[in-house]
Amino acid sequence: MVTPGSLVLAALLASWGPVWPAPEAPGNVAAQSAAPTTPEAAPPPVAPVPTAAPIAAPAIIARGPIDVRARPALVASPPATHEPRKPLHRQWAFWAIAGGLFVGAITAVVVATRPAPEAYRGNTSPYYVPFP
């Protein structure tokens, strides 16, 4: 499957060009005529491939005892401006909403599962009710 990502990658690789020049074929006439005929001519030197230096571990800047005890963020905390609120499960509105949702769910289940009423067909044979 061709995705936009693979198309972009293929375009980038194509625009980059070949990584190493193609070797010359021994029977190539144009390459033989352009090549020098003197025996002193040597191929151009190949530059060595640079290698990455090993990554050294960073030096520890500060050494000393590590204090893992918790400290308060503020030494002098500001005074409380309001009283703490009651927890949610202690508020009456929470239970009113929860109860309403519960009753609504039970009502929806009962209404959805009740069978439809049967049509009245009369109480005598052939059980036909004529239209007046």
Image (tube, rainbow, N blue to C red):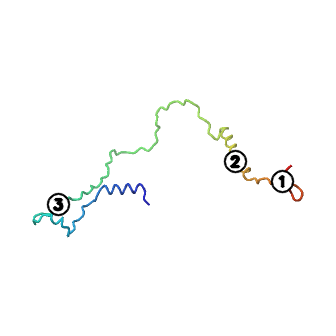
CA neighbours of label 1 inside 10 A, class few (<14), some (14 to 19), many (20+): few
- Tell me whether circle 3 and circle 2 mark residues in contact (CB < 8 Å): no
Corner quadrant of residue 16? bottom left
CA neighbours of label 3 inside 10 A, class few (<14), some (14 to 19), many (20+): few
CA neighbours of label 2 inside 10 A, class few (<14), some (14 to 19), many (20+): few
Report the Cα–Cα distance between label 1 and label 2: 31 Å
Which secondary structure lies at badge 3? loop
Q: Residue at x 35, y 55 (%)?
A: 11
Q: Residue at x 32, y 57 (%)?
A: 14
Total residue callouts: 3
Residue located beneath label 3 in the image:
45
Residue located beneath label 2 in the image:
105
Horizontal and vertical percent position of residue 123: 88, 56
- Which sits in the foreground, 69 or 37? 37
Residue 104 relative to residue 29: left or right: right
- Tell me whether circle 1 and circle 2 mark residues in contact (CB < 8 Å): no
Horizontal and vertical percent position of residue 63: 34, 46
Report the Cα–Cα distance between label 3 and label 1: 105 Å
Report the Cα–Cα distance between label 3 and label 2: 84 Å
Corner quadrant of residue 37? bottom left
- What is the three-letter code of the residue carrying label 1? Tyr
- What is the three-letter code of the residue carrying label 3? Pro
Q: Residue at x 57, y 30 (%)?
A: 82
Dividing the image into 4 quarters, which one contains the N terminus?
A: bottom left
- What is the three-letter code of the residue carrying label 2? Ala
- Which sits in the foreground, 22 or 27? 27
Horizontal and vertical percent position of residue 36: 12, 64
Q: Earlier in the sequence, mark 3 or mark 2?
A: 3
Which secondary structure lies at badge 2? helix
Residue 25 relative to residue 63: left or right: left
Residue located beneath label 1 in the image:
120
